[in-house]
Image (cartoon, helix red, strand yellow):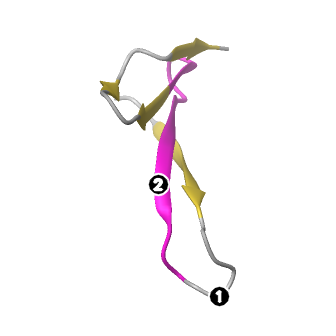
Amino acid sequence: MNHIEYSALNYYHSPISDECLCLGVLFHNITTGQRDFRYVCAREIVYDETIYA
């Protein structure tokens, strides 16, 4: 069974607001050491940014 951790990259447009825009999420598979950063851009959804430790 895989152990996955994740961290979200958020942009807060105002210091007094709780609203934010999620720019991407970094997934880290602890079992295999593989890291994937997934994000949405204006034209397409990108799924292929694989980072190996």
Give the image quarter of residue 14. Answer: bottom right
Please report the residue visible at 35 percent of the width from the left and 22 percent of the height from the top: 47
Mark 1 falls on what kind of element?
Answer: loop
Q: Quadrant of the C terminus?
A: top right
Gap in angstroms between the C-alphas marked 1 and 2: 17 Å
Q: Quadrant of the N terminus?
A: top left
**Residue beneath label 1, please?**
16
Name which of mark 1 and mark 2 comes first in the sequence: 1
Identity, as a three-letter code, of the amino acid under mark 2: Cys
Please report the residue visible at 65 percent of the width from the left and 88 percent of the height from the top: 16
Question: What is the x, y in percent for residue 12?
Answer: 60, 67
Question: Could you say which is closer to the camera, residue 32 or residue 48?
Answer: 48
Dot 2 alpha-carbon crowd within 10 angstroms: few under 14, some 14 to 19, many 20 or more? few
- The answer to whether 27 is drawn above or below residue 53 in the figure is below
**Residue beneath label 2, please?**
22
Mark 2 falls on what kind of element?
Answer: strand
- 51 left or right, relative to 15: left
Over which residues does the magenta segment extend? 18-36
